[in-house]
Amino acid sequence: MKDASPAPVYLKDYTPFSHLVDEVHLTFQLEPAKTRVISRIRFRPNPDATAAPLRLDGEGLVLLWAKIDGNPVTPEVDEAGLTCTVPDAPFTWEAEVEINPEANTALEGLYRSSGMYCTQCEAQGFRKITYYPDRPDVMSIFTVRIEGEESVLLSNGNPVASGDGWAEWHDPWPKPAYLFALVAGNLVNHPDRFTTASGREVELNIWVRPGDEGKCAFGMEALKRSMAWDEEVYGREYDLDIFNIVAVDDFNMGAMENKGLNIFNSSCVLASPETSTDANFERIEAIIAHEYFHNWTGNRITCRDWFQLCLKEGLTVYRDAQFTSDMRSAPVKRIEDVIALRARQFREDNGPLAHPVRPASFVEINNFYTATVYEKGAELIGMLKTLVGDEAYARALDLYFSRHDGDAATIEDWLKVFEDVTGRDLSQFKRWYEHAGTPRLHVTEDYEGDRYTLTFRQETPPTPGQPEKPPRVIPIALGLLGPNGDEILPTQVLEMTEAEQSFTFDGIPSRPTPSILRGFSAPVILTRPSSNSERAFLLAHDTDPFNKWEAGRALARDGLLSMITKGAAPDDLYLDAVLTMARDDSLDPAFRALALALPSQDDLAQSLHEAGHSPDPQAIWDALETLRQARAHKLQDLAPRLYAQYQVEAPYAPDAEQSGARALANAALGLITRLDGGAQAQAQFDRADNMTQQLAALANLLQAGRGETALAAFYDQWKDDRLVIDKWFSLQVLHAAPDRAADITRALTEHPDFTPRNPNRFRATLGALAQNHAGFHHASGAGYALLAQWLKTLDPINPQTTARMCTAFETWTRYDAARQDKARDALEDLLDLDGLSRDTTEMVTRILE
Ligand code: 0A1
Ligand code: ZN
């Protein structure tokens, strides 16, 4: 039955659980449709909580029997769990339940994927496995016995014993239920070893389905690099005898940090040069690092409640970004992260789904694994580090690890370690955690005598439920350039604490050009009147790579906005500047490739909306096409030279250097294709021996309107590789012309390889439609209707993925009234579905409000 107004949970209502759990023993008797789970749990009254009957969470379980201290009991069972009167003293709870992994298509709890058993318990999946206090502040020591006919039986911790058809695991580290994991399957492994700094020998494995063993080597190397890096940079060692990673095909998210047994979406761990692009390799390395780093930031120190999710996620994203910066190019990583932040988090923060990094309430916690919690959460860590300095940051982290090891902690605990180490009062900084919305930073300047003054004014628009926004502390990294391009003031950090604040600089001999918010030192929208010539000057001279890129990006964006709103021609200053930048061989090729990329259609729609226009998706698409064509002409001599110069002759390696060269050569291919109709792309497709080259060539052929033969050849070559076929689905949708996008997507959903049961395939097809901006927002409304129709099909199968994909609609009020009507109809139609899940109901309701 559809719950019309599911009740929210509030942070302010937090109370500790009535009992503590000393140990948990679980036995799994695996059978696809009738798995038995027998639990034996030692409870004792929690001295810090008010006494209450025992309340255990449980969903979709068939309770066969229950006992307390060996005596049968009959608890009161309801839809969400059970309640039982218990002794006012320590006691042992025992129960047996039956569950049906085969019927579990929601992919939460214990389910089957490609013939194997696996689990996903974050955030509240454990309650679908057995009755338990399924909340992160209840931590316990788990022993698990698995009985099943599969050759590989895995759980958390260390292996204790095994025999024919069974295995036992013991995890000595107390953990909440969301970190529980079990895997059983006929799997093969890619083994390795790691010796920790203190000499602990750790066995490492990546477990995959037979046939995938050739795609594990890169992930394993990334894991070892992560382990070494966490020791060197954060002093964190691994703490078990074994670390297992398992790849599964059906998974709602990227991966999961279960203690000692990380479970990965196969797309986030399996890699080979033939099947994975450079971007895939970089992402896989980052996700492996992310999950591994959770062992300390998430597992050893976990969250008191789900409102504190950013405590583990923001910090772990920050740590994985540091790792990638160290392994690859720091400026390139920063630029990539800011592009993603603006595309996903700014979009969220400026729409109906805006919420604080630490929300104060939620209906369904799964809906809060968002760009705000993760990516903005990471930005807050970065700002904190900028404000206190590197050395204090390191001391604060040491204190955090020593003070809170074994705890379920809060944001207050986190900020307190920084206050204790630095003596600073961080109450104003805390507003970043509590207030949603992206601050606008307005800048004016004044130059008189030799005194230069910058005045900043901050202002954050209201967000749902938060009309007033007090000023926040904003670290503004600033440099000044002289008229000849020399840096006259190297980077310094201004600390803005007021709503409006001025900073003066004396002894400045002539009017400088400011380079503001270097390295993107705060997640704000900078508004400062600037001329195209100043931007071209910064693109040429700024020593800060981020702001150098930013200047080029702003130049491109403003030119495009003039083309869209005023019918202007492509801006010559931009074209000249991009030519100068692209041929500057002193610049990193990866940087140049990024600087050649244009703002996305959605970014432009965001900017137009910000400037008070209602974006016309077709006009945006047309302007980008016109500018791309103009650039191809402007760079027509340079592009073939770059293309030839940056071909990689050495054997394929997914490192920063080679991937930067390929990125620049493929950017050049994009320019060439606009003039040669795809001849060069066809040649590249025919000789490609790695996926980066093959996919770039195919994308260009589709772009040139001559992709049919190559598409068929690609399918034929890769039809047995699910992950590559996902790319085949995506690419066709992403490159569909606006008026064809919905039809092409619909036709693909009728392909025998399409299934809504596999989240990767669903995202590759319908998620790609949402990314084809002009196609999804086509005036016919066909994009909206098709996506809503498929979300109605998916919801009963997989509510979590359905709810996440509703974010495609989060910008609907930006567009004209006719589009809004069509989007609202599609959303209301979805909301009308009988039995719509709580997940999707919450999302659609918030989007429509
Ligand atoms: N904690 C994991 C990601 C994750 C989050 C939620 C999930 O289900 C709702 C599953 C996985 C990470 O940050 O990698
Ligand atoms: Zn995480």
Image (cartoon, rainbow, N blue to C red):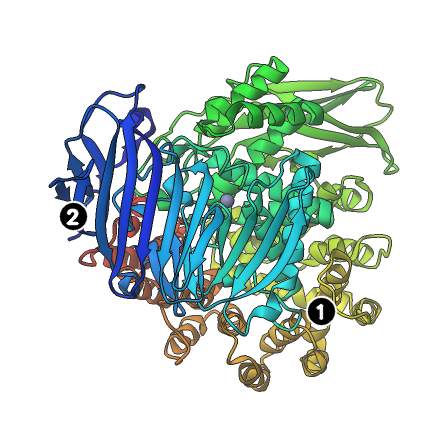
| Element under disc 2 | strand
| Element under disc 1 | helix
Residue at mark 1: 671
User: Which residue is rendered at x = 74% and y = 64% of the image?
Assistant: 653
How many residues crowd mark 2 within 10 Å: few (<14), some (14–19), many (20+)?
A: some
Count of number-bearing discs: 2
User: Which residue is rendered at x = 37% and y = 67% of the image?
Assistant: 149
Residue type highlighted by circle 2:
Trp
Q: Which mark is residue 65?
A: 2
x, y percentage for residue 82? 18, 40
Mark 1 to mark 2: distance in Å?
A: 69 Å
Q: Quadrant of residue 45?
A: top left
Residue type highlighted by circle 1:
Leu
- Look at the picture and state if 63 lies above or below 360: below
| Residue 213 visible in the displayed image | yes
x, y percentage for residue 630? 70, 65
Q: Quadrant of residue 498?
A: top right
Q: Are marks 1 and 2 in contact (CB under 8 Å)?
A: no
User: Which residue is rendered at x = 58% and y = 42% of the image?
Assistant: 293
x, y percentage for residue 39? 28, 46
Q: Which mark is residue 34?
A: none
